[in-house]
Image (cartoon, rainbow, N blue to C red):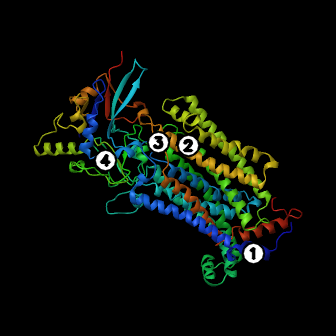
Amino acid sequence: MATPNEAQINRDLLGPLFKTGPRYYIAVALFGALTSVVFIAWALQIMFGIGMSGKNRPSFWGLYITTFVFWIGISHAGTLISAILRVVQAEWRRPITRCAEAITTFALITGSLFPLIHLGRAWLFYWMVPYPNSRYLWPNFQSPLMWDFIAINTYLTGSVTYLYLPMIPDMAVARDKATGWRKKMYRTLALGWRGTEREWVRLEKAISIMALIIIPVAVSVHTIVSWDFAMTVMPMWHSTIFGPYFVVGAIFSGIAALLIAMVLIRKYFHLEHYLQPIHFDNLAKMLFAMSLLWFYFTFTEYLVTWYGNEAPEMPVFWSKISGRFAPLFWLMVTCNFLIPFPILAIKKLRTIPLIFFASSCILVGMWLERFLIIVPTLTHPFLPYNYGTYWPSLTEASIAAGTLGLFVLLYFLFAKFSPMISIWEYEEGLQVASKHAGDVHPGH
Amino acid sequence: MPQWGMTVDLDRCTGCEACVVACHAENNLPIVGPEQAAMGRTHQWIRIERYWEGEFPNIRARFMPVMCQQCDAAPCEPVCPVNATYHTPDGLNAQVYNRCVGTRFCANNCPYTVRYFTWFTPEWPSPLNEQLNPDVSIRSSGIMEKCTFCVQRIRRAQDTAKDETRAVRDGEIQPACAQACPAKVLVFGDMSDPDSQVSQLANSRRGYRLLEELGTRPRVVYLKEADA
């Protein structure tokens, strides 16, 4: 394939910013409608009470927390993957970092709505913020929910910074191309970028520092999310491996989400030259490794529980293996392991459509995994008299499903506003490649 | 400082649920109606757990009244992000309704499942709305509630005793459940006084605590003769 020159790159990558087809408006209207479902349902829930959800005693948590953990997991797509690839200087990362980092930011925004939606008195959420007040009332820093609140805010701040830093030179390019109010907007966002040597050195340094900082932050975030469960005394929640188990699951679902986004961006923005099979192949190999790791953790978790044979844990265990939750459990194993394993392991099957299929299965499987961690434990508490059932209500289901619309909407709007492939990083990659004579393929 | 506690004599309990009714009346527990009840949204700060043992015809029912165990090391307390549940100096596990934002984390971490959530604004069908207890606040929608050991009765007795410049007498305070129990299953009192009735019973050889192995150190002691 001929290497595109600079003008062509600018045209290809900036094109979607300035040319908008009818398909885009239809998609925005569709996902916008889905998003409005979330807020209408939420408004009704606030008006009538949290009882509008299907929760009960003993199942005090349900779809909201499941979907919360799911979105926070998806958020590991981006920042973590892009940061790791940057730190190890993997050259093939260049066209995928931007779409990955955008997933993180929007998945975090979507996910962090859920702890609020889930509150019995959502309008008092700010009581969890440590602010000075006349009664000297502070939040309880012993609570894993407080750690969550702090960790997610840290991660959101970090990943927005990390998304924005490499966008600055691209904003400058867009500023030079744009007219009218957009020029004003891009001028503000470009922070007066002129592209001097000193600016480049500082930008590169800032990006490397953020990449190093964001990795431990990302790992800690999902560890802390897992501690919402692991810190309790409840059967099959109180597990020491939940931290790494959740981090592995998060990266697993994150890579799957990234692959799905890449397939769609490639198709609808015609970026076949930029997102090449090698990128999908490399990420698919990472996804394969995560699938094996996920299976290993799941196997360990369940084997140890079964062998330990503790009275309070066994009803939870059997409800998943052969009881009421068994269909969901085995669907999860199928989606997370049995389907992706052959597709990702066999080179011939690692094609873009099949990778897309495997990734979609993994997203379903990982959502089920979170559901199966939360609900079976809650419906089987210590005293068997209190065993219960849980069935999500319409309000709950439409909010959970509607946030998919919110996420896609935010992502779509972002794609109209910033190039989805970092222009300067891509060009830098071409320069690096041309230095290595005879090795111009961007995949190496 | 007294340390409040209770004993539950399982050898005496007939499972009549008078305690449950008394608790509803005393503590303004919401009546949720059949649909909500079927969903598992009843409020029973004290409930009678019934377990069947054996197969018909050699079958027997076991009754176990369960209320908040007022654990000394309560798992519900550290997990609340806004400190809405905390420990009073006299050993009560207190819930601050005004402070609760409704994360329901406390209820998830309660091994006894004795915390109850107000899913909707409570309404009482007439004439029940005319008999609400003025000493107990009505809990609004979206907050957690649970057995308080009838803290309003404890405080009133303490005030009376203070006015009369004397200590609270053993047996002077009776939570509604204990007062209503025809079989005298429930005994309430000061655990720190070795001569109180509740201490004597709790220290008898029949005493044990529910899910003791979790290390929650409950303030409720169950009494049961080992089966022959």
**Mark seen at residue B30:** 4
Q: Is residue A391 left or right of residue B148?
A: right
Q: Position of residue A226 (x, y in %)?
A: 54, 47
Query: For numbered disc 3, what is the local secondary structure?
Result: loop
Q: Is residue A344 left or right of residue B112?
A: right
Q: Residue furthest bottom?
A: A180
Q: CA distance from mark 2 to mark 1?
A: 46 Å
Q: CA distance from mark 1 to mark 4?
A: 65 Å
Q: Give the mark count.
A: 4
Q: CA distance from mark 3 to mark 1?
A: 53 Å
Where does label 1 land, which residue? Answer: A10
- Quarter residue B24 falls in: top left
Q: Is residue A213 left or right of residue A150?
A: right
Query: For numbered disc 1, what is the local secondary structure?
Result: helix
Q: Is residue A32 left or right of residue A359?
A: left
Query: Which residue type carries mark 4?
Result: Pro
- Quarter residue A173 falls in: bottom right
Query: Do badges 2 and 1 share one subunit?
Result: yes
Q: CA distance from mark 4 to mark 2?
A: 32 Å
**Mark seen at residue A372:** 2
Q: Residues within 10 Å of mark 4 (few under 14, many from 20)?
A: many
Tell me whether circle 3 and circle 4 mark residues in contact (CB < 8 Å).
Answer: no
Q: Nearer the viewer, residue A292 or A401?
A: A401
Q: CA distance from mark 3 to mark 4?
A: 28 Å
Query: Which residue type carries mark 3?
Result: Thr
Q: Position of residue A218 (x, y in %)?
A: 59, 55
Query: Do badges 3 and 1 share one subunit?
Result: yes
